[in-house]
Structures are given as C-alpha cells and as structure tokens.
Image (spheres, helix red, strand yellow):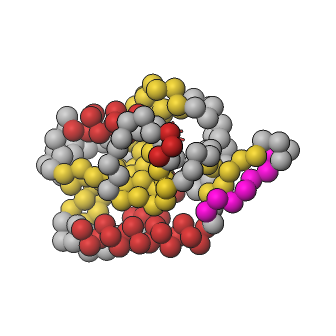
C-alpha cells in the first residue's frame, strides 16, 4: 500500500505563503491586481495567498489548463479547459501556479496571456523543480524550490487524488 512522506508541512507552507502575500502587497500597494490561478492545482495556494493580500484592490479570474494526463510525466500538450471570464487588457496580472516543472505549461500560458495585452504580468508559483527545466521561466514570487520528486497535496494531485492534503508530500507506491 502507498505511503506518503511529508516534504513540507502545513505550518511551513502557511508561513511562506503569508510572506509571499506580504511581498506582493508591498509591490502593488494602492494598485489593482487581477490574480489568475491556473486550475486545478493552484486553487488551494491561491485561496491562501489572496487572504494575505492587503492594500491592493484584488480581483480573481480562473484559467483552466491541463498539461499532464493522469500520469506523472508532462505530455507537452497544453489544453485550455476553461478560459478567463473578463479581458485583462491594461490590467496588472499575477498568474498563480502550484508548480513550474518543465516550464512548458507556463511558456504556453505567458505567450497566450501576452496577446491579451495586460499592463504588467508576473508569475507566482508555490513550487519550482529546477532539475526538470526544459524552458527557463522567471518566477517573480516563488514559495519553495524542490528536488526532482513527484509532489502531492495542497492542491497537487496524483491521478486526481490527494489534492486535499494540507501539506506537501511524496508518494511512495510500494509503501
Ligand atoms: C501541473 C501544474 C502546472 C504544470 C506544470 O498541472 O499545475 O500547470 O503541471 O508542469 P510543467 O512546468 O512541466 O509544464 P497539471 O497538468 O498536473 O494539471 P492540474 O493543475 O489540473 O493538476
């Protein structure tokens, strides 16, 4: 039976996400920002992050993307499963991701969003796995850099399971 090793516990995640929120609040003080969480993986991170935004006029719009199948490897094919509901032209935008792994998804996304002409666009990602980089992405707000392990929990899945865990863990299939 599979077991799960804790990689980053809930308290440490909360502490780091609060810091990220404070940094964003400082950088955008008095401005308006549209947060764009990329579904599904970032929904928990985004929900926690925006609760730490203060002094910024904050709106949120979701983008549904899917770059992996149900396996653990990127397919290289990115699908938009649900698009933004409003124009981001002239807006300050922060894309919120759970993980930048190969960078293929984010490259696709940044190219796509640029054509919509936001005033500025930055990237907030909870995790980055540099060992797997295929396309280098500048992550403006980064939670944690991790080793090349398959991470689950806090929004991240394996075959759509485990998103509910309050911590980040690594699945050991053999236990
Ligand atoms: C994950 C993650 C990123 C992408 C990163 O999404 O949320 O969008 O993979 O991988 P990359 O840098 O190698 O492109 P996934 O396709 O697993 O969908 P999900 O967010 O719905 O779980």
Question: Residue shown at 21%/62% (left/top)?
Answer: 32
Closer to the camera, 39 or 105? 105
Closer to the camera, 160 or 77? 77
Measured as percent of width and height from the top left, residue 136 is found at: 36, 41
Horizontally, is 47 left or right of 73 in the view?
left
Q: Is residue 5 magenta?
A: yes
What span is in magenta?
Answer: 2-8
Horizontally, is 62 left or right of 130 in the view?
left
Residue 157 falls in image quadrant: top right
- Quadrant of the rendering where the N terminus is positioned: top right
> What is the residue that sits farthest to the right in this orientation?
1
Q: Main secondary structure of the magenta part?
A: strand
All told, the count of numbered labels is 0
> What is the residue that sits farthest to the front in this orientation?
131
Horizontally, is 25 left or right of 64 in the view?
left
Measured as percent of width and height from the top left, residue 104 is found at: 41, 34
Horizontally, is 23 left or right of 117 in the view?
right
Measured as percent of width and height from the top left, residue 149 is found at: 62, 46
Measured as percent of width and height from the top left, residue 5 is found at: 73, 56
Question: Residue shown at 54%/66% (left/top)?
Answer: 13
Q: Is residue 99 visible?
A: no
Where is 128 relative to 166, above or below?
above
Q: Is residue 100 visible?
A: yes
Question: Residue shown at 62%/44% (left/top)?
Answer: 150
Question: Residue shown at 57%/50% (left/top)?
Answer: 147
Where is 163 relative to 10, above or below?
above
Residue 49 falls in image quadrant: bottom left
Q: Is residue 31 magenta?
A: no
């Amino acid at each position: 039976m599979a077991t799960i090793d804790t990689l980053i516990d809930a308290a440490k995640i909360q502490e780091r996400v609060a810091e990220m929120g404070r940094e964003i609040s400082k950088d955008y003080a008095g401005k308006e920002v549209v947060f764009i969480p990329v579904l599904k993986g970032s929904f928990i991170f985004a929900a926690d992050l925006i609760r730490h935004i203060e002094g910024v006029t904050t709106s949120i719009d979701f983008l549904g993307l899917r770059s992996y199948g149900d396996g653990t490897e990127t397919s290289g094919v990115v699908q938009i499963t649900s698009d933004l509901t409003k124009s981001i032209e002239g807006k300050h935008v922060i894309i919120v991701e759970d993980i930048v792994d190969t960078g293929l998804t984010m490259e696709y996304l940044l190219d796509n969003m640029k054509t919509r002409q936001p005033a500025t666009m930055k990237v907030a990602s909870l995790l980055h796995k540099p060992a797997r980089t295929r396309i280098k992405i500048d992550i403006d707000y980064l939670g944690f850099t991790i080793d090349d392990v398959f991470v689950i929990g806090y929004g991240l899945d394996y075959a759509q399971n485990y998103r509910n865990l309050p911590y980040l863990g690594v699945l050991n299939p053999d236990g």
